[in-house]
Image (cartoon, grey):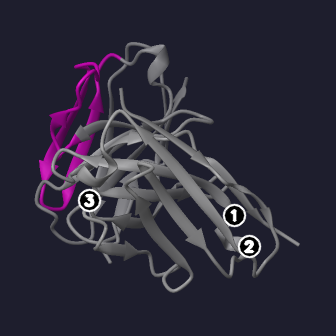
Amino acid sequence: DIQMTQSPSSVSASVGDSVTITCRASQAIGSWLAWYQQKPGKGPKLLIYVASSLESGVPSRFSGSGSGTDFTLTISSLQPEDFATYYCQQVTSFPRTFGQGTKVEIK
Amino acid sequence: EVQLVESGGGLVHPGGSLTLSCAASGFTLSTYPMNWVRQAPGKGLQWVSTVGGSGDVTYYADSVKGRFSISTDNSRNTLYLQMNNLRAEDTAVYYCAKAGHGDSALDSWGQGTLVTVSS
């Protein structure tokens, strides 16, 4: 199975800050990576697919990059609605494993 | 507009069975791979199972293989998860999710249904 490791587990930031979350795969997955946002009590929401493609309707302050084993999600100029938990998921093989999540909290 | 609405969760004793349903609207279920993903209380997301758009290919996490069965009813545009021999560690919110972008991501999710396995 491919293991997905996110860092950090949590980050405190202020409105207007830029935040970068890292996701590392235990083996190469090409660009087959998605990023999701989840708010308490809600189902996840797709942000980024194939590592860097922005889902329709997602603000352009969200961006993704990377390939192979190392990927990043960057949120530029954090907005109040961005405080949430973020997950990466590899979709190159089954089981379709998720990272453990990164909680973005208000400083 | 795509909508996914899960139902069927509840309290069940260890060793018991439960069937979850996910009613889809705004798209034709048979056109896309469909998934179940779960989240134990206070924990992260765990992929559980996928069924191909044709319904003839299925995949399961090792932790549920042999106990859970994923299926679709195209006439009802509904996805199911039959769960047998339930264990305490199966306690979670179960989400159904539609695959999109050529099966490269889960682009629509339901609100989830809570399954609690406890004596």
The residue indicated by pointer 1 is B91
Chain at numbered mark 3? B
Task: Kindly tell me whether residue B75 is visible in this rendering.
Answer: yes
Q: Amino acid at mark 2?
A: Ala
Taking the spot 13% from the left edge, 54% from the top edge, the residue there is: A31
The answer to which quarter of the image holds residue B58 is: bottom left
The residue indicated by pointer 2 is B88
**Secondary structure at numbered mark 3:** loop
Above or below A74: residue A79: above
Chain at numbered mark 2? B
| Horizontal relation, residue B6 to residue B59: left or right | right
Task: Kindly tell me whether residue B32 is visible in this rendering.
Answer: no
Q: Amino acid at mark 1?
A: Thr
Frontmost of labels 2 and 3 is 3
Q: Position of residue B20 (x, y in %)?
A: 60, 59
Q: Disc 1 versus disc 2: distance between alpha carbons?
A: 6 Å
Labels 1 and 3 positioned on one and the same chain: yes
**Secondary structure at numbered mark 2:** helix
| Horizontal relation, residue A71 to residue A79: left or right | left
Total marks drawn? 3
Q: Disc 2 versus disc 3: distance between alpha carbons?
A: 31 Å
